[in-house]
Image (cartoon, rainbow, N blue to C red):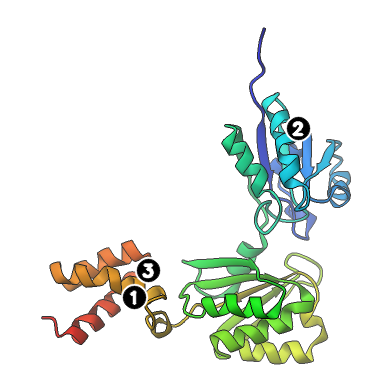
Amino acid sequence: MTIAPPGRLYVVATPIGNLGDMSARARETLAACALIAAEDTRHTGLLLKHFAIATPMVSLHDHNEERRAPELVAKLRAGDNIALVSDAGTPAISDPGYDLVRACVSAGIEVVPIPGPCALVAALSIAALPTDRFCFEGFLPARGAARRARLAGLASEPRTLVFYESPHRVQDMLEDCAESFGGERPAVIAREITKLHESSYRGTLAALVARALTEPEFGRGEIVLVVHGAPAAAGESGADGHGGALDRVLEPLLAELPLKQAAHLAAKIAQVRDNEAYKRALALKRAYGAS
C-alpha cells in the first residue's frame, strides 16, 4: 500500500487594493491547490472570480481558526495542498493564520510562503523615515487607556514604529502618540495604499493631529501610521529603555577593551548602530573618568 506524501500549506499574499499586484505565482498556487482557507470566503470569492480560479474554499478567521486548524492539518497529512489567504495582504500579519501555521509546523507539514503585498512594508518604503530597523506594533488596543499604556511603553523605542489603525480612531491615535512621544516627532500617514484614493500625509505628530481635525478625508480608508523612533537622548534615558540595555553591555566591555572595539561589540550584542554605541561608550568613559 502506497502512502501519499503530506501536502503543503501555501501562505499566499493577495492584493491590498490594486488587483494588478496579484503575482503570477500566487494565481498559479491558488488554482493548483485542493482547498483555499480564506478569512472571508465571500471576499476571496470575488478575487477568485476575477482570475477565473475555481478552487473550493473554507473559512478560516479569528473566531474559528483554533477549531478549524486540526481539520486542515488532517487534510494536509492526507496529501492535500492548501492555500491560506486573508482578505488582503499577507496572512498572519495582523490577520488570521498564525494558529494554522504553528499547527502545521508542529505536525511536520511544510509551510511555503508565496510573498507579495504587505501594507506595513509598502508604507515603510515611502515614509522617508529610517528603515534599517523598525518595530511593527499592528493594531493597538481600541480602548484609550490601554492604547496610551502601550504607547507609553514605546516612548523611548529608538526604532521606527509602524501601526495599523482604523479610520474612525486615527485622530485619537495621533493625539495619544503626540502626548506619549511629543508633538515634534516626525510621522507619516499612508492611506488607502494601492487603491484609487491612495494618499500620504507627512509632518510632525502635532501637524498631523491638526490635519486630522480639519480634513475630513484624512480619516477614511485603510491606514498605516509610521512614526520616527525616539531620539538618542530619549533612548539612553532609562535603565528600562534601549539605552539601559546598551549600558549594561558596554560597561564590562569598556573595562577590558579599547573604546572602539568595545563599542563595535556592544553594537552587535545590543543590536544598535555602531555610531550610537560609540557615542554612548564615549559618554560613559567621560562620566566615569576612564582613561
Q: Secondary structure at mark 3?
A: loop
Amino acid type assigned to the residue bearing label 1 in the image: Glu
Q: Residues within 10 Å of mark 2 (few under 14, many from 20)?
A: some
Q: Quadrant of the N terminus?
A: top right
Q: Which mark is residue 276?
A: 1
Give how far across and how far down residue 2 sits, in percent.
66, 10
The residue under the point 70% across, 92% down is: 210
According to the picture, the residue beneath numbered tag 2 turns out to be 32
Q: Is residue 161 left or right of residue 271?
A: right
Amino acid type assigned to the residue bearing label 3 in the image: Val
Where residue 139 sits, quadrant-wise, is bottom right
Give how far across and how far down residue 51 sits, in percent.
84, 44
From the viewer's perspective, is residue 281 above or below residue 12? below
Give how far across and how far down residue 224 sits, in percent.
67, 71
| C-beta proximity under 8 Å, tags 3 and 1 | yes
Give how far across and how far down residue 269 sits, in percent.
32, 62
Q: Which is nearer the eye, 14 or 92?
A: 92
Q: Secondary structure at mark 1?
A: helix
According to the picture, the residue beneath numbered tag 3 turns out to be 272
